[in-house]
Amino acid sequence: MSPRRNPLDRRRILVPAAFALGATLLPAQTQWLAANPGTSPAPRGNRAMAYDSTRGRVVLFSGYAIPVSAETWEWDGANWALVTAASAPAARINHALAFDFARSLVVLFGGDTGGGTCQGDTWTWDGAVWVQRSPATSPSPRNQHAMGGAPGDRLVMFGGHDGSSVVADTWEWDGTDWTLRNPANSPSARYAHAMAYDSGRGRSVLFGGDSGPGFLLAETWEWDGSNWIRAIPVVAPGPRVNFAMAFDSARSRIVLFGGQSPVGLLADTWEWDGSTWIQRLTPMTPQARRVAGLAFDTSRGRTVIFGGQGAGSLLGDTWEYGPVHPAAYVATGSGCSAAAATPVLAATASAPLPWLGSTFTLRVTQLPVGAQFAPFLVLGFSNPNRPLPWLPCVQRVDGEAFLVPASGGAAGFDLNIPADPAILGTMFHAQVAVLDAVGQPLLHALSNGMMGTVGGR
């Protein structure tokens, strides 16, 4: 439910939009920062990376170093560590790696040995052991294909090069077997494209690639679990191959970086929000490169890039990309109640973070049911934590109170955050108080508190 007045409106101002070269260019709300790990893989390209959200690690396997390696490396946000396993896939390049959320496993398929021999094997990694799988049905051996998450607790793979021709088949992995899909619509055959799974919208996004020989594409396609749908945005990245993409789940954006265009290496950053491609300008950027690895670190809210091939040399640098002002939400303290159940205040899964220009939705559950109970959301910018002698809960908020109509023991509250850069970084607090019109004392219950920080994406 929307409040009568939005406290964040106090600082609303108008900011002119910026335009350049037909693209929507935003102010520097995001940034690339170079990492300086003490330990790092050797410079390499043509590797694959995926983020293991169960263990909080970015996983990198193999790649074109000198020589082609069969190494497994993991990034914890501060350092790279070489992981030794009893068995592992053979050394390879141009393979695909994706995280299977339903089974908490990193999945690898295909690639080539560096001499042009395509592979068709499937492996899984649990953080300690590589296991070669033996599916009853399997895609043909290939390299330079793309793989990512898909609706229905599956992975989806598309295209690639089988050593003699470019393919255009769609396969899904269910944890046990591969299934060839036959959608009514499909992208054309291609290789050296990229895919990332937008888990918020339940779409696997594919961009670019080479349809062969040397015909580079700039198409955007989405897989909804049963069909491919081509998106035709007004603005899009230029044609390219061997770039990298990952889904930033905190900001609900696909991030694309670099690659090879018809005229040379690229160092541009783009984002796809489901309807529009937006080019982002940042104060610093990694140097132009192709065949780099990219993955989104969910626990830290950062997109990580490693290595690739620059102008004439392999690269071994690590960079991280994310918002200059991250949005944040955290539940604080504990509630208390004169009844058995204590109200619980939380952000909703559909709008979990307070981003500039968005609606941030709070929901309170376990409210007492009855006509005499009136829940109020107290919203403000200070958090004095003063105890109440008759109802000593941990969290306190000083601010304005808004009556929130409840139904069935629950209520919702929409906080409309202005698209105003002046409020970036603003911290606010909230708590729900339940009044009892007939009971003693009048204050019947308090929920836990919450603290939010307005971020820009």
Image: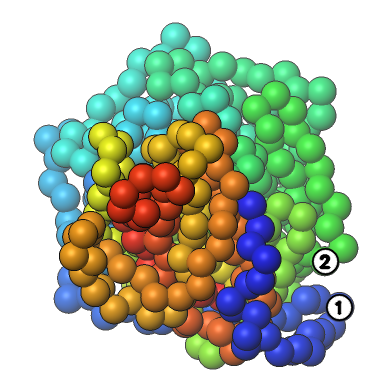
Q: Position of residue 411 (x, y in %)?
A: 53, 44
Residue 15 pos. (x, y %): 74, 89
Q: According to the image, label 2 marks what residue? A: 235
Q: Is residue 131 left or right of residue 145?
A: left
Rendered image quadrant of residue 316: bottom left
Q: Which class describes the residues within 10 Å of circle 1: few (<14), some (14-19), or many (20+)? A: few
Can residue 228 be spotted in the picture?
Answer: yes
Residue 251 placement: quadrant: bottom right
Q: Is residue 78 visible?
A: no
The residue at 66%/71% (across/down) is: 5
**Residues under labels 2 and 1: Cα distance?**
7 Å
Label 1 near label 2: C-beta < 8 Å?
yes
Helix, strand or loop status at disc 1: loop
Asked which colour scheme the image uses, the reply is rainbow
Q: Amino acid at mark 2?
A: Val
Which residue of the protein is positioned furthest toward the top in this rendering?
Answer: 136
> Which of marks 1 and 2 precedes in the sequence?
1
- Please name the amino acid that badge 1 sits on: Gly
Residue at the disc numbered 1 = 22
Q: Is residue 418 left or right of residue 70?
A: right
